[in-house]
């Protein structure tokens, strides 16, 4: 297994192109796969997670052709039964989007994945599918993958499910519902968390000619039956979730100046709020039509931040909290326990190892600032965002930092270390 060694740097200087949006790529692939005819997806993110989605849509009949940075997807007239067990790798999005769609395949589908995926909860989706007249089971009866779907007539009718476990359950049902032979109603029993991700799903459905009636608070949905997806050509925007790590690093290292191109469509991406977060902490942020530029003149200030809609920002924010003046409090972080790792435990363990002072209390992470970070050997627990967060911390730490299993970043941002290198960081692969 490889390791990466990082040394501290004084500043980051340079320009990079944003990695394409993972969330948008997943959704564009799913919608295009259900549209009879040809859709093009320009600038897609090709990473382990989106490759899992590509393989799944092929398994139920979609045809894919890749030329340079364009994917051409020919969608299905009807969802076919896959020939084999479906490997969703470590992608929660893939398994949660595909499971409801496969209720329309005539046979039985089995979906599983890697070790961390088999720890991601599926019970709320299984329960919703049962209400929607679909036989769907967790193979071990514990609410986790492998998942078995008995297909046939597909989802139909009404279902209620919680909105605070994963917004991916709701997006998965919304992608499947237009194919139903009866109207579908979905009701959330708790307020929706990560609402912008469902809003992105609704926007992409609209581009493909699908009508969904949703209440303003996104707790009630009505989807008319027998709709047909129309083909659509997508331009995938840059990914604010991935860019956050580079933007945060530039903010933390005074006298830095970096520009990331390809960051637009900010209204579609929850994590574009990083722009306001960095400004509130004291960094200078300039937003152009197609770029974001961060410069840092002085030490950052700690803030209070509600992560209810943007859980993926938390790893980078905790690092900034360690380095800022005062205390940083990040609210509504409970759901981080059920990501690729238990991110709360992982962040506390690894950043405290580097000299940070993080505690978890009452659904909040409290981060003490003004910490003198020191190099350490970091175990990211196979979690891409933990590896990237600790890599950013390493740039401000005293001495060398070793990141174990750094290749886990390929899950979402395959060029992360290359981009750091372009900005002036020496990367030593061991």
Image (cartoon, rainbow, N blue to C red):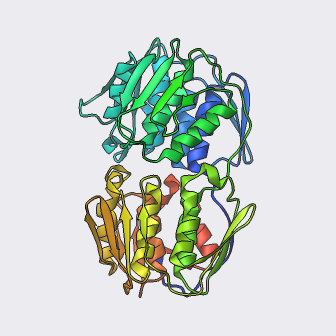
In the image, 150 versus 179, the foreground residue is 179
- Residue 279 at what x, y percent from top left? 57, 73
Residue 84 appears in the figure: no
Q: Residue at x 64, y 55 (%)?
A: 266
Q: Is residue 248 left or right of residue 143?
A: right
**Picture quarter containing residue 66?**
top right
Residue 368 appears in the figure: yes
In the image, 28 versus 85, the foreground residue is 28
Q: Is residue 359 left or right of residue 270?
A: left
In the image, 418 versus 393, the foreground residue is 393
Looking at the picture, does residue 341 appear above or below residue 56?
below
**Numbered label tally:** 0
- Residue 309 at what x, y percent from top left? 46, 52
- Residue 261 at what x, y percent from top left? 71, 64
- Residue 334 at what x, y percent from top left? 32, 54
**Picture quarter containing residue 127?**
top left
Quadrant occupied by the N terminus: bottom left
Residue, far front:
216
Looking at the picture, does residue 343 appear above or below residue 369?
above
Q: Residue at x 72, y 48 (%)?
A: 69
Q: Residue at x 40, y 19 (%)?
A: 132
Q: Residue at x 37, y 87 (%)?
A: 372
Looking at the picture, does residue 190 appear above or below residue 382?
above
């Amino acid at each position: 297994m490889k390791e990466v060694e990082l040394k501290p740097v004084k500043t980051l200087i340079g320009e990079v192109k944003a990695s394409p949006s993972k969330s948008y790529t997943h959704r564009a692939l799913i919608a295009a796969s259900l549209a009879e005819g040809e859709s093009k997806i320009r600038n897609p993110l090709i990473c382990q997670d989106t490759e899992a989605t590509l393989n799944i849509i092929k398994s139920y009949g979609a045809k894919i052709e890749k030329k340079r940075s364009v994917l051409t997807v020919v969608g299905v007239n009807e969802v076919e039964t896959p020939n084999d067990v479906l490997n969703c790798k470590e992608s929660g999005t893939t398994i949660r989007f595909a499971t409801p769609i496969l209720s329309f395949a005539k046979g039985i589908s089995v979906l599983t994945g890697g070790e961390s995926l088999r720890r991601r909860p599926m019970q709320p989706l299984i329960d919703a599918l049962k209400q929607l007249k679909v036989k769907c089971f967790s193979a071990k009866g514990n609410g986790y993958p492998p998942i078995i779907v008995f297909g046939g007539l597909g989802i139909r009718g009404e279902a209620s499910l919680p909105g605070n476990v994963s917004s991916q359950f709701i997006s998965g049902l919304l992608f499947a519902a237009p194919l139903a032979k009866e109207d579908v109603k979905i009701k959330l029993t708790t307020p929706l968390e990560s609402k912008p991700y469902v809003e992105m799903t609704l926007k992409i459905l609209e581009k493909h000619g699908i009508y969904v009636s949703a209440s303003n608070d996104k707790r009630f949905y009505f989807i008319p039956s027998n709709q047909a997806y129309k083909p659509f050509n997508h331009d995938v925007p840059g990914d604010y979730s991935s860019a956050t790590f580079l933007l945060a690093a530039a903010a933390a290292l005074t006298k830095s100046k970096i520009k990331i191109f390809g960051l637009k469509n900010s209204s579609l991406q929850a994590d574009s709020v990083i722009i306001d977060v960095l400004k509130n902490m004291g960094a200078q942020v300039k937003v152009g039509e197609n770029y974001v530029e961060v410069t840092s003149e002085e030490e950052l200030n700690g803030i209070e931040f509600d992560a209810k809609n943007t859980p993926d920002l938390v790893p980078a924010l905790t690092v900034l909290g360690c380095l800022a003046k005062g205390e940083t409090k990040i609210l509504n972080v409970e759901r981080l326990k059920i990501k690729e790792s238990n991110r709360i435990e992982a962040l506390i363990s690894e950043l405290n190892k580097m000299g940070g002072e993080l505690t978890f209390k009452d659904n909040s992470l409290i981060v003490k600032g003004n910490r003198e970070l020191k190099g350490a050997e970091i175990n990211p627990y196979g979690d891409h965002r933990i590896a990237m967060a600790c890599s950013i911390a390493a740039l401000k730490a005293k001495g060398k930092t070793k990141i174990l299993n750094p290749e886990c970043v390929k899950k979402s941002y395959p060029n992360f270390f290359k981009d750091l290198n372009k900005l002036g960081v020496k990367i030593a692969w061991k």
